[in-house]
Image (cartoon, rainbow, N blue to C red):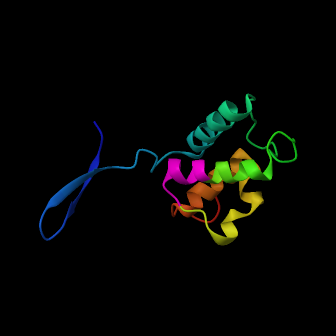
Amino acid sequence: MTESTTRSTADSTTFEPADPTADLPVAAIEDRIGAFLEAKTKATWEREVDLFASGAVSSLFAMELVVFVESTFGIAVEGPDLALDNFRTLRSMSALVIRLRGGGDDA
């Protein structure tokens, strides 16, 4: 059963499904990002491998990663958070997701 939240306005009440990624553990976040990377690069990625140093991922592809992370996890990556360092590894991307979702500064 999917949880939902209720929001009332002056005229009506609407029901919105709860975010299914809201309480994902770090490993699950990394697995989702890893599956996206595997589909795009046709390679399997370890959690600490530098995607850009490997040569398989370009800075142009980083923008595709940003869009994927934003749309999948319901966050906005802006300003200083757009740094390549936040997208170098599966671990750094999951830490960014957790931090931007209010899960703390150190994931």
- Residue 64 x %, y %: 66, 48
Answer left or right for 83 relative to 103: right
- Residue 76 x %, y %: 54, 62
Answer left or right for 19 relative to 41: left
79, 96: nearer the viewer: 79
- Residue 2 x %, y %: 30, 40
Q: Quadrant of the C terminus?
A: bottom right
Q: Is residue 92 above or below residue 35?
A: below
Q: Is residue 27 magenta?
A: no
Q: How many marks?
A: 0
Q: Residue furthest left?
A: 11
Give the main secondary structure, helix, strand or loop, of the magenta stretch.
Answer: helix
Q: Residue at x 57, y 56 (%)?
A: 98
Q: Quadrant of the N terminus?
A: top left
- Residue 6 x %, y %: 22, 57
Q: Residue at x 68, y 37 (%)?
A: 37
User: Which picture quadrant has residue 5?
Assistant: bottom left
Q: Residue at x 77, y 58 (%)?
A: 85
88, 105: nearer the viewer: 88
Q: Is residue 42 above or below residue 50?
A: above
Q: Residue furthest front?
A: 60
Q: Is residue 70 magenta?
A: yes
Q: Residue at x 68, y 53 (%)?
A: 63
Please give the range of residues in magenta. Answer: 67-75
26, 57: nearer the viewer: 57
